[in-house]
């Protein structure tokens, strides 16, 4: 009796399990819960997941940044559009072909590093970050600094050289301080 009860329970579980894995969709008004599909993601979804753009960090050294941007620069060069190639064209009196530049940028865009998250316009808190960096710079004695579109501006209307040079020296420190607090 116990054995037949176990077999009956196994059969019920198997039937229910098979129903949960079926590909049939419930009627919209049936109230039946939807079951996640185990189907493979599309090729475009897989490609997008595999090609995540690299992201710069506030604490990157110059060497870190060069290593991060190297694949992008190599790609642009392979498409005839490195910065050096563009400078040579312009210095040689040739105009840059906008179609070639755009084609290279399109081909290489997934390799171009994103800005640090704190500075990324896609980050809804980036304005707060820049506001706090400006406050830090002012606290360190920078006279002419203000929040600007997508960042902060040094020098003010007077283009104050001291505010610009000292601000540029102190900005990385302030950026790291503000990021560490958040």
Image (tube, rainbow, N blue to C red):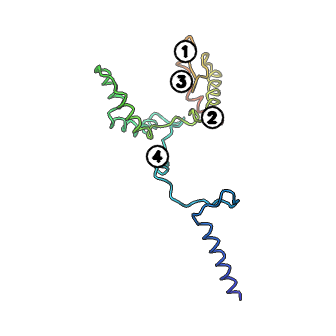
The local secondary structure at tag 3 comes to helix
Among numbered discs 4 and 3, the one appearing first in the sequence = 4
From this viewpoint, which residue is outermost toward the bottom? Answer: 1
Q: Which residue bears the numbered disc 2? A: 124
Look at the numbered discs 2 and 4 and tell me whether their residues touch, using CB distance below 8 Å. Answer: no
Residue neighbourhood size for the residue with mark 3, other residues' Cα within 10 Å, grouped as few (<14), some (14–19), many (≥20): few
Compared to residue 145, the image places residue 45 above or below, namely: below
Residue 86 occupies quadrant = top left
Q: Residue at x 68, y 79 (%)?
A: 9
Where residue 167 appears, x then y in whole percent?
Answer: 56, 21
Q: Where is the C terminus found, in terms of image quarters?
A: top right
Mark sitting on residue 118: none
Residue at image mark 4: 51
Give the residue pinned by disc 1. Answer: 162
Q: Tell me which numbered mark, 4 or 1, is placed earlier along the sequence.
A: 4
Q: Spatial distance from mark 4 to mark 3, Cα to Cα?
A: 35 Å
Secondary structure type for disc 1: helix
Classify mark 4: helix, strand or loop: loop
């Amino acid at each position: 009796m116990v054995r037949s009860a176990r077999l009956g329970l196994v059969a019920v579980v198997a039937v229910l399990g098979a129903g949960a894995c079926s590909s049939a969709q419930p009627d919209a008004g049936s109230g039946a819960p939807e079951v996640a599909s185990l189907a493979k993601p599309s090729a475009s979804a897989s490609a997008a997941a595999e090609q995540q753009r690299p992201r710069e960090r506030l604490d990157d050294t110059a060497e870190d940044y060069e290593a991060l941007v190297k694949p992008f620069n190599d790609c642009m060069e392979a498409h005839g559009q490195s910065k050096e190639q563009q400078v040579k064209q312009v210095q040689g009196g040739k105009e840059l072909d906008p179609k070639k530049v755009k084609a290279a940028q399109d081909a290489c865009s997934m390799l171009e590093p994103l800005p640090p998250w704190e500075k990324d316009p896609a980050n809804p808190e980036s304005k707060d970050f820049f506001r706090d960096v400006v406050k830090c710079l002012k606290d360190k004695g920078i006279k002419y600094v203000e929040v600007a579109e997508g960042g902060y501006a040094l020098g003010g209307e007077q283009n104050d050289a001291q505010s610009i040079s000292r601000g540029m020296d102190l900005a990385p420190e302030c950026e790291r301080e503000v990021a560490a607090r958040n």
